[in-house]
Amino acid sequence: MAQHKSAEKRARQSVRRHARNKAYLSRLKTLMKKVRSSKDRENAATALKVAVKTLDQLAAKGVIHKNTAANQKSRLTKFVNAIK
């Protein structure tokens, strides 16, 4: 257990941030699945646009690393471009 006031506050902040980050990542995974499950190119392209925006936002907030976001955007874009 935390012994100091500042450590107790840090513990509270950590719990809140963990819950927020978990929600962000869950939403991101759902958006990425939506891109991958799209059968036609138009739906995939619109889903990709939303997923890319979310990836950029999470990278800017520090929830995920910027290189991770770049890799995921690249993979999803390749997937969408491969759809006939």
Image (cartoon, helix red, strand yellow):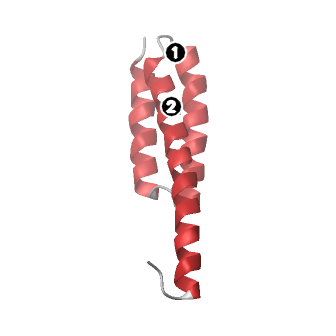
**Relative height, residue 67 to residue 27 (above, below):** below
Residue at position x 46%, y 49% in the image: 69
Q: Which residue is mark 2?
A: 30
Residue that extends furthest to the bottom in the rendered view of this protein: 4
- Residues 50 and 15: in front is 15
**Relative height, residue 9 to residue 39 (above, below):** below
What whole-number distance in Å separates the C-alpha atoms at marks 1 and 2? Answer: 18 Å
Whether residue 64 sits left or right of residue 47 in the image: it is left
Q: Which residue is mark 1?
A: 41
User: Could you tell me the amino acid type at mark 1?
Assistant: Arg
Q: Which mark is residue 20?
A: none
Residue at position x 55%, y 38% in the image: 27
Which quarter of the image is occupied by the N terminus?
bottom left
User: Could you tell me the amino acid type at mark 2?
Assistant: Thr
Residue at position x 53%, y 62% in the image: 15
**Relative height, residue 63 to residue 23 (above, below):** below
Secondary structure at badge 1 equals helix
Secondary structure at badge 2 equals helix
x and y percent of residue 11 in the render?
52, 72
**Relative height, residue 53 to residue 38 (above, below):** below
Which quarter of the image is occupied by the C terminus?
top left
